[in-house]
Image: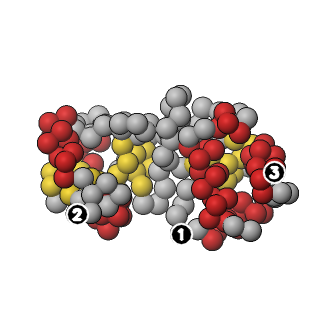
Amino acid sequence: MNYTQLGKEISFALRHHPEQYHLVMDEQGWVEVEQLLKALEDKYGQLTEENIIELMQCSNKQRYELKNHKIRAYYGHSLQSKIKKEQQVPPHILYHGTAKRFIPSIMQKGLQPMNRQYVHLSLDKETALQVGKRHDSSPIILKIEAYKAYQDGISFYLGNETVWLSDSIPPQYISQD
């Protein structure tokens, strides 16, 4: 089984176009595993929940969570309706990797989710660097005063072990690392 291809397709279905797979998603982004497996059956044959578990264990990226025979993507959604997340207390510092060309706008307007539901922040500089390299071969790493922003009323949500989310980050909490 090609787990890389299957993983990308599951991400696409859960993050971006559940309607193309006829998936019914609740307001927290959960979908019945059985429904997802049925939607993938024509392309991948008979799949089981154990195949999904094995896929998750093989991957070095934690993209989904599985609970009570339901599955959802942790983050990265570009769906029309916003996936509701539970607010969490963030660490003191988070990071965001970005292209140099975006710096003037970010320093003026702050970090905005753009075409996603949330701003994505990294727990460490290395992850932020890798994310930033998607847009620039020499990205800028931004340091986010997350805990101070949280104390001032900015909401943060846990994406997974290394990704934090926020609705937006005003510029006063952002500096270049």
Residue 4 lies in quadrant: bottom right
Q: Amino acid at mark 3?
A: Glu
Residue 127 lies in quadrant: bottom left
Vertical side of 105 occupied by 56: above or below: below
Residue at 55% from the left image edge and 56% from the top image edge: 63
Residue matched to label 1: 60
Per the model, the C-alpha gap separating discs 2 and 1 is 24 Å
Q: Position of residue 55 (x, y in %)?
A: 67, 65
Helix, strand or loop for disc 1: loop
The residue nearer to you, when weighing 154 against 81, is: 81
Residue matched to label 2: 138
Vertical side of 52 occupied by 114: above or below: above
Q: Amino acid at mark 2?
A: Ser
Q: Position of residue 109 (x, y in %)?
A: 19, 34
Residue 110 lies in quadrant: top left
Vertical side of 10 occupied by 52: above or below: below
Residue 41's tag is 3
Asked if one can make out residue 124 in the rendered structure from this viewpoint, the answer is: no
Residue at 36% from the left image edge and 43% from the top image edge: 119
- 147 left or right of 59 in image: left
- 161 left or right of 4 in image: left
Residue at 58% from the left image edge and 68% from the top image edge: 59
